[in-house]
Image (cartoon, helix red, strand yellow):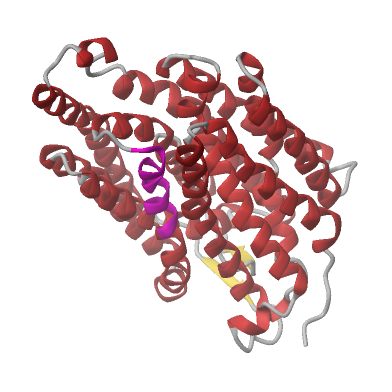
Amino acid sequence: MTPQKKTVAQPSGNYQFAFILVTSLFFLWGFAHNLDPILIPHLKKSFTLTTTQSTLVDSSVFAAYFLMALPAGFIMKKFGYKIGIIIGLLFFATGAFLFIPAANTQLYNFFLVALFVMACGLAILETAANPYAASLGAPETATQRLNLSQSFNGLAAALAPVIGARVILTKGFSDEELSKMTEAARKIALASEASSVKAPYMILGLILVIIAVVFAFTKLPVIQEEGRGEASKSIFHALKHKHLSWGVSAQFFYVGAQVSVFSLFILYATKSAGLSQVMAADYLGICGFLFLIGRFLGTFLMKFVQPQTLLALYAGINILLCAVAITATGMITIYAILGICFFMSIMFPTIFSLSIKDLGGDTEYGSSLVIMSIVGGAILPRVFGYISDATGNIQLGYCVPLASFTVILLFGWKGYKTKQSL
């Protein structure tokens, strides 16, 4: 996601192929993100981690988004979208390849470094791909194109947990087998399980290198940018727009809530409903599918309901579902989380668009600030994990998403209203 400027792609005959290439990026980064919920229980078991320690996976990923938001925008401005996409793909691939030495050395911190490098690439790709996809065609159909591209992100959310669980979580020893081993043998066995990630991430890295080469040899349409009025005085001036400040806060809490729900789902489901890890991963795939359906349905409903009204309504419903996730037991807790996933679907793009509305010359800084607020995905899951470890009850961790959806409800109710900055 980049500064929301009016963009026009120069006439070209390869719009369709360029659009397909760019849309593939949405699927790839969605697939990578949605492998993280598989990595968390896998690494938690392999390295005998607490829930809080295992959430460092998310911290590594979303800290990279925070740190790369402004540099990614500079790369696009300095070198253009094509070079930016290639740089992002190469970072992405490098991080994937680093999983091999991480598994060989059997160091948890090495895995975190690999994830951080991958996420730097993802941040650059998201900064480039969203506005570029919207610009590949007539301006009046930009929203439809972007929603079509984003739907492949939702498709990845449905497929990645199901595929990842069968490639990664089915490898290794059962708890019963581990309990019969000596302490030394058990440590060796658990550490060796980390090696099951090498093949899938090596394949992912190779695919990314191939796509980077295709981009390098493809002539893409050039985007011409038109200014949006007087340039912003500073990033602090942009924050004088109260609805932007509200939006940054809402996006921080939304991303933190989404990551908490998705990344800790398998750990949650095995405790609250007694599911196996593979079965829990299948339900996580259903979460991704409902997220995808929710995005399509929400886009349709916005023809009849104001986006901020729908946002507040969905946030209110999720507050109630979080209460169920905290207090109930058995499969009803899983159904509550499935509902949360459905009603989260519209939140990121809706918060984003409402946050940067009518910013004028502050749009560039405003967009970067909203992207930087993704750091909520690095912080709030750790709070979730801390509550879970401190109380011995992972269900109480859902106090974090409950509080987050309360902030989003307030944004959709009043915080979205635009006011002129000074």
The x and y percentages for residue 273 are: 55, 16
Quadrant of the frame with the N terminus:
bottom right
Is 182 on the left-hand or right-hand side of 420?
left
Would you identify the image quadrant in which residue 233 lies? bottom right
User: Is residue 176 placed above or below 192 in the rendered structure?
Assistant: above
* Residue 227 magenta-highlighted: no
Which one is nearer the viewer's eye here, 219 or 304? 304
The x and y percentages for residue 25 are: 45, 45
**Image point (58%, 54%), residue name:** 136
Is 92 on the left-hand or right-hand side of 151?
left
User: Is residue 395 placed above or below 286 in the rendered structure?
Assistant: below
* Residue 60 magenta-highlighted: yes
Q: In the rendered structure, which segment of residues is drawn in magenta? A: 50-63
**Image point (40%, 59%), residue name:** 64
**Image point (27%, 33%), residue name:** 48
Which one is nearer the viewer's eye here, 323 or 114? 323
**Image point (73%, 54%), residue name:** 407
The x and y percentages for residue 77 are: 47, 74
Number of numbered discs on residues:
0
Q: Main secondary structure of the magenta part?
A: helix
User: Is residue 209 placed above or below 3 in the rendered structure?
Assistant: above
Is 198 on the left-hand or right-hand side of 409?
left
Q: Is residue 88 visible?
A: yes
Would you identify the image quadrant in which residue 324 lies? top right
The x and y percentages for residue 24 are: 45, 40
